[in-house]
Amino acid sequence: MKTVKLLLNLRLQKVSQVSSLYIASSVKTNIFQTVETLLLSFSFRKANMSTEKPPLASGLARTRSEQLYETLAAAIKSPFGSMDANGVPATAPASIGGGRETLSRKSSRRLMMSASPGRSGGAGTHIRKSRSAQLKLELEEVSSGAALSRASSASLGLSFSFTGFAMPPEEISDSKPLSDDEMIPEDNEAGNKKPRFQAEPTLPIFLKFKEVTYKVSIRKLMTSAPVDKEILSGINGSVSPGEVLALMGPSGSGKTTLLSLLGGRISQSASGGSVTYNDKPYSKYLKSKIGFVTQDDVLFPHLTVKETLTYAARLRLPKTLTREQKEQRAIEVIQELGLERCQDTMIGGAFVRGVSGGERKRVSIGNEIIINPSLLLLDEPTSGLDSTTALRTIQMLHDIAEAGKTVITTIHQPSSRLFHRFDKLILLGRGNLLYFGKSSEALVYFSSIGCSPLITMNPAEFLLDLANGNINDISVPSDLEDRVQVGNSGREPQTGKPSPAAVHEYLVEAYETRVAEQEKKKLSDPVPLDEEAKAKVLRLKRQWGASWWEQYCILFSRGLKERRHEYFSWLRVTQVLSTAVILGLLWWQSDIRTPRGLQDQAGLLFFIAVFWGFFPVFTAIFAFPQERAMLNKERAADMYRLSAYFLARTTSDLPLDFILPSLFLLVVYFMTGLRLSPYPFFLSMLTVFLCIIASQGLGLAIGAILMDLKKATTLASVTVMTFMLAGGFFVKKVPVFISWIRYLSFNYHTYKLLLKVQYKDFAQSINGMRIDNGLTEVVALVAMIFGYRLLAYLSLRQMKITT
């Protein structure tokens, strides 16, 4: 016993010397008493077990007491080499600083994690925290073979678990202080880690809005006059950097409209009141400082998470950053949002499997926080998510706000945990303001006006019931009851309680009389910024994140990656190749030396002109209507110039459009016996390419003008059918008053050009068409290529940006 006690004393002296700490004598005495008691208990067990030995081998039948004895015996072995006469190590580890008087918090944490048997697996992330000056001894657990004891020392910050797990002395090597953030459990799935780059200096924005109103004109019938409908009425509020403001209310209460007004996404002509940013009005140059996350996740389904954020970074981050720095910023966002596991997974959509709903929502948020915005607006970021994922999303918003950002989010029906995480709350009902203030004081306010829950319920559920006028399980204010009785109206006939309209009127009046004036006075207070900081809002210049050429290249690359899956789908490839094989079999080695064979081959050329005029039109009409939401979102954020987008969108299809027609002609040309010469072959292929580009321009123009797939498909069907009938094959003699249509038909010019390429040296005219050099047809097709696209571009310029 004395030997073990002496060895333990030497061990404590060594640890104290290494860490430069002085343990109080009272704590040492407690440790000695604990060890002595343990050894006595062990000796008692040893004596009892000496008469009855278990049949199992010693290595398998070791009890915790025996493990403790071995641990104490191993303590006499010094990891630091020889000792002097006083029992002090002759040499200390190089990693321990000589002048330190306390162990670092991080070293203490590592020691705790090493000494805990629950950390041996390495899978968990929970951190065992040692309590100050806590020494426990459970004699009952000693005799039962359970965990014998845990001795903790506040001065060392260590936690020992005597369960046979030896603490490696090499862990006492890191002297870097431990920050509070390192004690937070890491969760890669939820992204609970603190943002790094969001803490970069940015322009703080104090947002205030006073008496905000918004109306829309609704025409119920085509002949009736429009009626103004009030969406918002007299909304007041404010939010400062570092705060999270929640806009809550039932469906149709005006949450999204108010959020869009605050983000500058709705025209100010239809709204009233004032919205100020650092006491300055809204300017379009604030777009670079505002991030807006829409309710629907508008993302390209065939791009991966990493590609989506990388393209956003290259388009939106300032020109002063290099491409490598922008891509590194995207990687940092992926890490901060916990998207490492799915960064190479496609986003997915309705018909494409991809990431989960929570991950898709985090990608949408990453698209906005990547620019380090001063004001972040989110429209129902938790809709469709489970409660745990929603909580993690709101916690992430808190982390962003703590970095000095202003965060506003709409919320539909949060859980009680989510509700208590908001700093401020605005409760809307039928476009009116029912409450504005701290979320923690909302229940106190409604209790003061006589509305209290009669049963235990979620605070958010209680507030939404009030906003809907539903007072089931809610106390009825005496003022409201008296008002209903005096008026003898406003009462539900079945329940006898006040009607939703009466409840709503009472809540609006109560807020106006009790709270509204005080809040309006607060809104009049100037923001705590100097005039120079306020003026920065007006001095912001519209700066593109990339030059026009860089925008074009980025959008061209993005378009190729997104649409390659559509163009090379097995369905489309099968459609084109099967059609080519059928044509080759029907016109197998046709002979043009006879009039009948010449007419048959002319029919083949007309079908080629019709097929490659019809096919691209109905592919192109989907381009702009399908990307309208993405175009609205990115144009509202000033990600690129419209001209760069339009040119990249129209030219990124060309490489893909040339592959399938080339395969088609390779099959048809040689199976049907067309002129086997390089000159006619390449001219025929060039003619088909001109037809494809011209017809594609028509489809783009129809889609851009109508922006509605049903209407565009109907108009395209009628137009293509008219062009086909006027193409010169079915009707040779067209009346003069309608003959001008054929000159607008790309089928007509393509058919004539194919005839001239194939039969230039064979005949003077075919089907009444004179065979010449075909320059007129080439000029007409080139004019259509540019004319239709110019019409589509002008239509996009006139399109209003909507949220």
Image: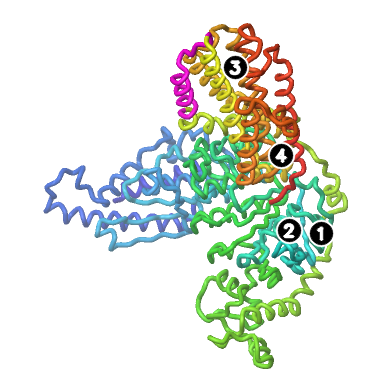
Q: Marks 2 and 4, Cα distance to the nearest angstrom?
A: 26 Å
Of mark 1 and mark 2, the one earlier in the sequence is 2
Q: Marks 4 and 3, Cα distance to the nearest angstrom?
A: 38 Å
How many C-alpha atoms fall within 10 Å of the one at disc 4: few (<14), some, or many (≥20)? many
**x then y, percent, for residue 331:** 59, 36
Of mark 3 and mark 2, the one earlier in the sequence is 2
In the image, 179 versus 564, the foreground residue is 564
Please tell me whether residue 719 belongs to the stretch shown in magenta. no
Point out which mark residue 685 bears: 3
Point out which mark residue 639 bears: 4
- Under mark 3, the amino acid is Met
- Under mark 1, the amino acid is Val
Q: Marks 3 and 2, Cα distance to the nearest angstrom?
A: 63 Å
Of tags 1 and 3, the one toward the viewer is 3
How many C-alpha atoms fall within 10 Å of the one at disc 1: few (<14), some, or many (≥20)? some
Query: In the rendered structure, are the residues bearing label 1 and label 2 in contact, judged by CB atoms less than 8 Å apart?
Result: yes
Range of magenta residues: 574-593
**x then y, percent, for residue 81:** 41, 32
Name the side, left or right, on which 675 lies relative to 369. Answer: left
Relative to residue 740, is residue 662 depicted above or below? above
Res 108 visible = no
